[in-house]
Image: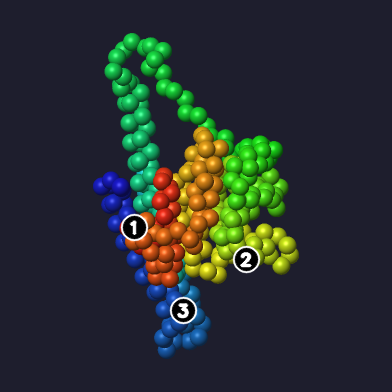
Amino acid sequence: MADGSNLDTINAALSATQKLRASVTRVFTHLKDGVKSTKGEVTKEGVFVSELKKGLSGVNDDFSELEKLTSSLQKFTDTIPMGNSGLLSLDPVQDKTPLYTQLLQSYKWSSKVQTHSSLASSMLTQNSLKRTTVATGLSAKRKKLTPTSHAVPSHLVDAIVANLDRLFNDMSITVNRPKGAGAVLQVTVGRTLSAIVVLRGLLIERVVVRGYHENSHKDDGQLDLWTPSRYQVFQKLTDHAMAAMLHYHLPHLPEIAIKSFMTWLHSYTTLFSTPCHRCGKYLNNNLPPTWRDFRTLDVTHDNCRQ
C-alpha cells in the first residue's frame, strides 16, 4: 500500500493530468476554429500563430509538471511478479477478465501455505516427538517392502500359470503375449464360460467374462480385450470378477492372490446347475445365481445376497 505522501503525489498527478487534457483541448479547438477577426489576412495569420504558440507552450508546461510528479512517485514494494499472466487483465472478453485477479489470489494463498508449512517443519524438527530420549536400535522404523509383483519375469509367470493349469482338471489356461512382456490369460471354465485375464507381471489388471461359445478374437485374429459379452449373465460375471480382482489383490503375495482368484473363477463350473443357497431357486429375474462368496464360495443370486 502507498503511504500518505505517495497518495498526495497521486492526487496532484491526477489534477495535472486533467489540466494537461484541458490545455490540449484548447489547442485543438483553436486549430479547428481559427481566429475570428476583421483585420487583414496578414494580421489574422499572425494572431493565429501567436495563439497557437501560447497554447503549445501551456501544453508543454503542463506535461513537464505531470512528468515531474510521476517521477517522484514511490514504487510499490509488494508487487508480485506474475510475468505474462498480467496480460490476462487486459483481455476484453468479460468471462476471462477476472482470471488475473483469481490467479493473484491463488498465488498469495499458496505463498502463505508455503511459509506456514516451512515454519511448522522447522518447529517440528526442533521438538522431536519421541517417548524417550534414549535412542535404541528397536526404535528404528521398519522399512516398507516395495512390491515387485508388477515386474515379474515372463518365464516365472509362465511357470506359475502352468501350475494353475494342472491344479484344475476342468479349467484350461492359455498364455498369450500380444504386447511384448504383458501376459493375457485365456481361461476356459468347463463348457460354461471363457474369460480374458490381463496381467501386469502377476497383478490382475482387467477381466472380461464371455460365454463359452462366444468369439474372443477380433477379425484380425487378435484377442478382444474390451468388448463385453452380449449376454446379461456374463456381463454380471464380469462385474463380479472385477470385484474379486480387487478383493484378492495382494502385491506382496502375488502367487496366492492369482491362485485365490482362479479358485474363485473355477467355482463357476456349476453356474447353471446349482441353486441359490438363500432362496433355493435356479433362476431369479431370469438369471442364475451369479454371485460366489469370496471366502466360502457360497452360491447366491445377486439380489439374494443383499
**What residue is pinned by disc 3?**
31
For marks 1 and 3 on the same chain, the one whose residue lies earlier in the sequence: 3
Q: 101 or 60: nearer the eye?
A: 101
Alpha carbon distance from label 1 to label 3: 102 Å
In the figure, is residue 299 to the left or right of 148? Answer: left
**Residue 238 screen position, x and y as percent:** 51, 59
**What residue is pinned by disc 2?**
213
**Residue 143 screen position, x and y as percent:** 47, 25
Q: Local crowd at mark 2 within 10 Å, few (<14), some, or many (≥20)?
A: few
The residue depicted at 48 percent of the width and 87 percent of the height is 40
The residue depicted at 53 percent of the width and 69 percent of the height is 231
Amino acid found under the numbered disc labelled 2: His
- Please tell me whether residue 103 is drawn above or below residue 33 in the rendered image: above
Amino acid found under the numbered disc labelled 3: Leu
Alpha carbon distance from label 1 to label 2: 30 Å
Amino acid found under the numbered disc labelled 1: Arg
**What residue is pinned by disc 1?**
278
- Please tell me whether residue 126 is drawn above or below residue 164 in the rendered image: above
Q: Which one is closest to the eye, mark 1 or mark 3?
A: 1
Q: Local crowd at mark 3 within 10 Å, few (<14), some, or many (≥20)?
A: some
The residue depicted at 43 percent of the width and 53 percent of the height is 292
For marks 1 and 2 on the same chain, the one whose residue lies earlier in the sequence: 2
Q: Which one is closest to the eye, mark 3 or mark 2?
A: 2
Looking at the image, the residue that sits furthest to the bottom is 38
Residue 244 bears which disc, if any? none
Could you tell me if residue 55 is visible in this image? no
